[in-house]
Image (cartoon, rainbow, N blue to C red):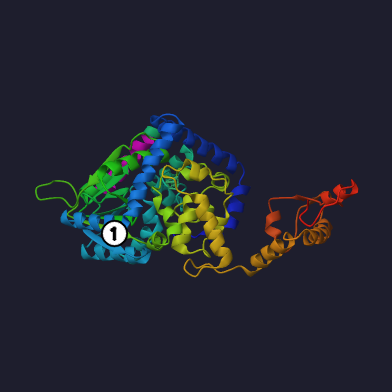
Amino acid sequence: MKLTPRNFRKLAREEIAKEGQSKKLIKKCHELNVIQEEAMSYYGEQDGQDRARGIAGEIRTNTLDNLLELLVRFEVNASLNGSKVLWAENGDEAVSLIGQIIKQHNIKRVSKSKSSLLEEINISEYIKTKTDASIYHNNLGDFINEELKSPPFHLNNPILNLELEEIVATLHKSIGIPLTDNPSDVASYVNDYFRSHNLKADMSITGVNQAIASTGSILIVENAGNIRIATANSKVQVAVMSIENLCDNLGDAFFINDLATRNSTGQTISSYLSIINGPKLEGEKDGPSELYVIILDNGRLDAYLAEEHREVLRCIKCGRCATVCPVFKRIGAYPYGNPYPGPIGNILMPLILGLNETKHLYQACTLCGACSEICPVQVPHVDLIMNYRNLKANGDRKLDATVNVWNKMLFQSYARAISKRSYYDRSIIGMRAYLNNNANGDYIENLSGPIQSWFITRDFPVLPEHTFQHYWKTKGHLLNEEGE
Ligand code: SF4
């Protein structure tokens, strides 16, 4: 499904207007946060958890400081293991490489695993429309979203927003499972269904949770075992990873994975953790005969080279920042129009789509900092968002940011008005007349012109006849130009 953040405002309004929606979302996020906090308590009280975040932060710093060397080392070791490592500059290149692999190996059935990166390149659509192969999702959340034509609701909990009845009703309609209110029965029916498909797939497409430079292996985690079955049985595996998604060694990868798991699903460990070193060796029964690893850039290398954006690449895609974000908790995932709903998408998507295309994302932030505070690898969301806003206000060719002339004029006028006491006083007189003329009783509820949208969800009290300064003067005090 092609996603775009362009409809952010319209969709956000629609979501807010849905009866009970915000309440339900706040409850869901709270429930998930409780489990995540419990999982993090393994590291002790706040101090211990901060220490764990500090270690994870250092591992990510090490990756970013040595990124190019680690990528080369990974490529060399993976190639020595028999994998074929390919590089893709953008999503089009990545899907085209996958198309060529499908053609070359005469692939008829593709099993697709859950991965935000695969949503980012929109691989399902490409395979359906541009190849002769059929594709099906082997993850329950993705499968249901495909049926409902909805984008993922969360990085690792793609149907976080749905109740059990909605899930069962969808599966009953699409694959005929019996109507039940027992989650274990649902899991069992669905697993049987996925397994029968996975056993017939001749190619699996997966993401990569972490690549390990020193061994050339890839680490994949999941909970249902479907990825393991798909990769063990299909003759070809294509694993797509982004350039920053790697570690120096297995120990680092395990540590990062531990924090990612606790902060995403709230588990203490994922049910399945596969380390794939390469294609199957002579005499081995399981595993693909060919393993392709596609390393995707899609704007990340530019971010890496521009140091002020590099910190975005620390992210380990746990999705925790979304469930503490006051905006996400109000509007949910759909308005974001990208596979990374919430704060991480707000800082990642501008690097992929540019600042003009994504302005609603980095503007839809209260700068409360809850995301950075909870982030297990210390991503500084607020600094990055402030930087994007700054670049957008001043224009930036590289990140495709054109200046909004009206905004600029508005803020220039404001800056001039507050630069000197006498200007400020005169502006207040003008503003008072303008605002109060549009009042309905004691409040201004609507206003035409450039700040109209501010009033859609807010009211403003009418301005009093006199300012504080006037009141102060009448009490016998005089202010100088500096207002003292
Ligand atoms: S920015 Fe931090 S909290 Fe958000 S998804 Fe990435 S690692 Fe998780």
Q: Which residue is depicted at the point 24% across and 65% down?
A: 103
Report which residue position mark 1 lands on: 294
Q: Secondary structure at mark 1?
A: strand
Q: How many marks?
A: 1
Depth check, front residue: 142 or 349? 349
Classify the position of the N terminus by image quarter: bottom left
Asked if residue 225 can be seen in this view, the reply is no
Residue reaching furthest left? 283
Find residue 251 and report its image quarter: top left
Q: Is residue 388 left or right of residue 192?
A: right
Reply yes or no: does residue 86 show up in magenta.
no
Q: Please provide the residue range marked out in magenta.
A: 185-199
Could you tell me the amino acid type at mark 1? Ile
Residue 353, placed above or below residue 22? below
Residue 312 position, x and y percent, is 43, 54
Depth check, front residue: 115 or 403? 403
Residue 258 position, x and y percent, is 34, 38
Asked if residue 380 can be seen in this view, the reply is yes
Helix, strand or loop for the magenta stretch, by majority: helix
Depth check, front residue: 249 or 288? 249
Residue 196 position, x and y percent, is 27, 45
Q: Which residue is depicted at the point 61% across and 67% down?
A: 404
